[in-house]
Image: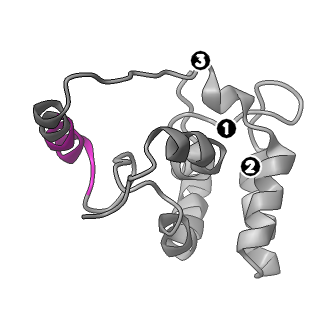
Amino acid sequence: MICAAPFPDRVLHHAAMNFCHASFETYQVYDSYACRVGKGAHKAVECARAFAGRHRHYLKLDIRRYFDSIDHEILKQQMWRRFKDRRLLEILDAIIGSYETAPGKGLPIGNLGTEIKGTPYLIMAIRVFLPCNKAT
């Protein structure tokens, strides 16, 4: 289910993401296109076409209920390792804890930052399947 936070919360999400964005970008996979400056759906299609021209096979994956399964405590720990500003961390903790699909789990699809905050869970698998995935 897609969730839209109330307007005051969205303003806070934008402020937090503006502060965190550069740090989150450092661990993004180059060929990840969602919610990233200079990327987006059109660039993703261009990239897919380029890959299709160079490769005969592809692997399509979809992780069922991925965002619903993200553990709040693990995500909060990752944020606490990445950032040191206590007020920012309190805000991130509140944002993470504001939605649950089960006790202590889930991120809302449709809120700013969900895709970016969900990336650390997938980074290891992505790097296994795409070991040469970097800017060219």
Tag 1 residue: 107
User: 22 left or right of 124?
Assistant: left
Circle 3 sits in a helix, a strand or a loop, which is it?
A: loop
Q: Looking at this rendering, what residue extends furthest in the bottom direction?
A: 85
List x then y, in percent, for residue 62.
49, 21
- Element class at badge 2: helix
Mark positioned earlier in the residue sequence (1 or 3):
3
First in residue order: circle 2 vs circle 1: 2
Location of residue 10 (image quadrant): bottom right
Closer to the N terminus: mark 2 or mark 3? 3
Crowding at dot 3, Cα within 10 Å, few <14 / some 14-19 / many 20+, comes out as few
Q: Which residues are magenta?
A: 39-48
Badge 2: residue crowd in 10 Å (few <14, some 14–19, many ≥20): many
Count of labels in the image: 3
Residue 38 in sight: yes
The amino acid type found where label 1 is placed reads Leu
Q: Position of residue 85 (x, y in %)?
A: 76, 82
Q: Quadrant of residue 87?
A: bottom right
- Where residue 3 sits: x, y (%)? 57, 32
Amino acid identity at mark 3: Arg
User: What colour scheme was applied to this rendering of the protein?
Assistant: one colour
Residue depicted at 86% across the width and 48% down the height: 73
Task: Give amino acid for label 2.
Answer: Ile
Q: Is residue 111 visible?
A: no
| Residue for badge 3 | 64
| Residue indicated by mark 2 | 96
- Residue ID at (80%, 68%): 80
Image coordinates of residue 82 in percent, x first then y, are 71, 71
The CA span between labels 2 and 1 is: 7 Å
Please report contact status of discs 2 and 3: CB closer than 8 Å, yes or no.
no
State whether the magenta stretch is mostly helix, strand or loop. Answer: helix
